[in-house]
Image (tube, rainbow, N blue to C red):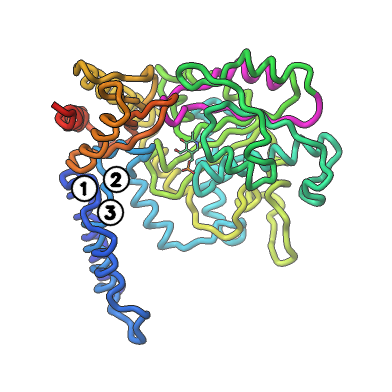
Amino acid sequence: MSTDLFAHTARHARKYLDDVAARPVRAIATAPELRDALLATSPLPAAGEPAAAVIDRLASAAERGTVATQGPRFFGFVVGGSQPVAIAADWLVSTWDQNAGIFVLSPLISVVEEAAGKWIKDVAGLPESWSVGYTTGCQMANFTAIAAARHHVLAAAGWDVEARGLFGAPAIDVVVGDEAHYTIFNAMRLLGLGAERLRRIPTDGQGRMRADALASALAGGTGPCIVCAQAGNVNTGAFDPLEPIADAARARGAWLHVDGAFGYWAAAAPARRHLVAGIERADSVATDAHKWLNVPYDSGIVMTAHPQPHRRAMTTGAAYIVESPTERDPHEFVPEESRRGRAVPVYAALRAMGRDGLADLVERNCRQAARMADRLRTHPRVAILNDVVLNQVLVRVSDDDAVTNDVIARVQADGTCWLGGTTWHGVRAIRVSVSNWSTTDADIDASAKAILASLPH
Ligand SMILES: Cc1ncc(COP(=O)(O)O)c(C=O)c1O
């Protein structure tokens, strides 16, 4: 019986994927319609519903209630679609239902994490000795890295932050680029470092941290210090200059963290690799697999040059938790204890693509972003605000906030593609992020056409 249920569900999944490229990208159903479909019987009835009917109910709601982020013409935020092999591997993860916390609960997941970790580090030439943890996303990867940093810089000052907290601790000089992603500030809040007491270093016209300003800010400083740089600005795709930033951080004795949520993967494409030059000199790096590696949510990765501080910041231990003396206990590298084996789809995506396939995915999306920019800038009222160095394009129409907002609304309503807006250096702009394996040049051309058709006459 359950076999039939799975075959039945697989047919729904197949249909969803077959239809996703042709349907409007935006959601069609409203929240009240979805409530009618999903919540018609509330409170929870005493009698259960047959499993296949529950699945049918969900699948039918999904046809109209999901956004086709999985499809080839979703360009909002930085959202990668999932590759088939990663979806299939994710099904296995649910089927096995392994608790990825400790080795004794799943030798398989422990070794998959190890293998995927080696390959991910290889992408950017990070040393094999670096530790790796699998988080829900880059928010938690940033959090975990900065927790390790907090441990390390305070331990160097003779302070055990895990035992004593921050009460009376030596002050940490936290220094970030002015355009750090908001999740960096969130991590600072969660870690008691304060989202506002840190020092912000000015950025240039593309949003890159100014290394000269960082060097001046750090000069002569003493005591605990954490510097956060960025590989891939969420608006422009620009990279902080990591070599001079690493020089300045090293001269100061600071922990250097790099947020490379999507930019990390530039290292995979030979023509873009120079953008992350120096990343191997960082103390920690955060990235996402659910963005540009195109695996299902939730999948972030934290890597550090300091396995012991990383472990100490994350691990408390308990009498009944059986630690392996020789093998990887995955919970030692992330805040969670019990969790799913989220490295499995990461492993599958990397293994199926190989180095060449990954390079091709990244390079193709970058070329498609440039193609989109070229198509749009043919119109006299369209300006491309950024240097398109990666997969991000910032577009402004008629040099006017209201007109630009109006174009965003019209494109979303049209449904050919989906993109969102942002405020960039004081002006409204349309954000285009090309991060999906299934996007074709024809999708770019059709979307550019739909965007240009949404311009006021
Ligand atoms: C540079 C950067 N850092 C961090 C994040 C947060 O990632 P997540 O949403 O996976 O937590 C993002 C998301 O877009 C990002 O672009």
Q: Amino acid at mark 2?
A: Gln
Q: Residues within 10 Å of mark 1 (few under 14, many from 20)?
A: some
Say which residue label 1 marks: 20
Upstream in sequence: badge 1 or badge 3:
1
Region in magenta: 222-250
Front in this rendered view, residue 5 or 228: 228
Q: Position of residue 434 (x, y in %)?
A: 32, 32
Front in this rendered view, residue 52 or 120: 52
Q: Amino acid at mark 3?
A: Thr
Q: Residue at x 63, y 39 (%)?
A: 195
Is residue 125 something that shows in the picture? yes
Q: Please say if the residues under marks 1 and 3 sit with CB atoms less than 8 Å apart.
A: no
Q: Amino acid at mark 1?
A: Val
Q: Position of residue 249 (x, y in %)?
A: 69, 22
> The C terminus is located in which quarter?
top left
Q: Residues within 10 Å of mark 3 (few under 14, many from 20)?
A: some
Say which residue label 2 marks: 70
